[in-house]
Image: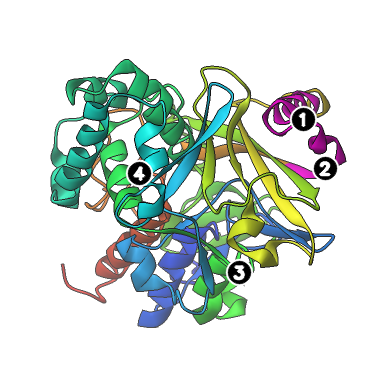
Amino acid sequence: MTKKDTEVIIIGAGLSGLACGKRLAEAGHPFLILEADNRIGGRIKTDEVDGFQLDHGFQVLQTSYPEVRKQLDLKRLNLHYFAPGAIFRINGRFHRIADPFRLPRHIPSTLTAPIGSFRDRLRIIQLAIKLGNTSVSDIFTASDQPTSEFLKEEGFSETMINRFFRPFYATASLDPDIKSSSRVFKYLFRIFTAGQAALPANGMAEIPKQLSETIPSKQIRLNSRVESLIDGGVKLQSGEEIHAPQVVIATEGPQAERLLKSTESTGSVGEYCFYFATENAPLNDSFLVLNGEDQGLISSLTIPTNIAAQYAPDGMSLVSVVVLRSSKEDEQTLKQAVISELTDWFGSEVANWHHLPTYYIPHALPRQVPPLADPTVSRLPPGKGIYLCGEHGSVPGNQWALLSGIQVANQVMTAAGLIQN
């Protein structure tokens, strides 16, 4: 008889692994989550440093994601919301561009910002209406192409593409060249124009924490890195073997490819996130700040304390700066270059800012090369008794991490005869 320690092993305690475990726990199906790190959350983590809450990289919760609303108690997260729109840095000045329906007081600045023609602005409204009336299924079954080509076909000017869409996509998909899947762009644009971006008062780590509440603590093992898959289970880095007839891989893309011994890679994009403390916030808005220039290191800047004051001690502000980088660089040199650029943006006051920890996230998001698979359809298992969930090979965002975890949990239970096809 084959040895069996549990029915299902889930590798990874990020959102997809936790969503899978939550679904199995609700059904009473035995499982064990193995997490290499010393805490749950995957990329969604929050550190407390000197009274400041530091999320690992720029992260927000889009409340209009259907699976987010289904799997999370948003009220308990005590959400605080970004303003619907963004501040664009163009030609050395800041320009506020807001949703005219939700923030009509910013209509003058929105109309006069140097992002493109009046016709471009009309096309944005038309695109938002069109995508809002398009089903998610239709978005992901439509023809796919690089987003830059899609925007040109929609009639947007080069100025609009470079000053508005490029910084937007550099932040939403970490793709400043806007070559990623037009399916991803259309879905994200639909979500951003219709929904709200928010931060939990106690940091983004509250999201995986809430997901894990229905999972018994004994069914999550931390500091347990899986070295390899073996017949009927996994082998840990420690040499321990754990056996189960079904194994779910819910890791980042590179780790999933390593475990599956895949010769193909979807690739990842990375980022640096620099944090600074200051007594005086450089801006008083709750907008995200985007770099609409055709130069500079900074991709985006956020002042989390303008959204949720809990991110810093009383009387202090927190500034978060994102720089896109696919490989690790000399942090000190990069920091000095970022400070120099911030000084150009905000003046000599930056010299009084105090540098807090910097985070380098090598696999911040998977690359989204077209054509991209339809994420609403369950993926075929890569092997007998092996299942795969997570954003890689799918669409970036909490929606798809959560949905893929639920989809795989249902596949697992179908294979075990607990639910019907």
State the residue at coordinates (38%, 32%). 112
Residue under label 4: 395
State the residue at coordinates (79%, 36%). 350
Q: Quadrant of the N terminus?
A: bottom left
Spatial distance from mark 3 to mark 1, Cα to Cα? Answer: 28 Å
N-term-proximal mark, 3 vs 1: 3
Spatial distance from mark 1 to mark 2, Cα to Cα? Answer: 9 Å
Would you say the residues marked 1 and 2 are in contact, meaning their CB atoms lie under 8 Å apart? yes
Residue under label 2: 353
Left or right of 115? Residue 329 is right
N-term-proximal mark, 1 vs 2: 1
State the residue at coordinates (81%, 32%). 348
Q: Amino acid under label 1? A: Ile
Choose top left, top right, bottom left or bottom right for residue 220.
bottom right
Residue 118 percent across, percent down from the top left: 25, 29
Label 2: which secondary element:
loop
Left or right of 381? Residue 319 is right
Left or right of 264? Residue 203 is right
Spatial distance from mark 3 to mark 2, Cα to Cα? Answer: 23 Å
Residue under label 1: 339
Residue 129 percent across, percent down from the top left: 17, 47
Residue 28 percent across, percent down from the top left: 40, 83
Q: Which residues are magenta?
A: 334-358
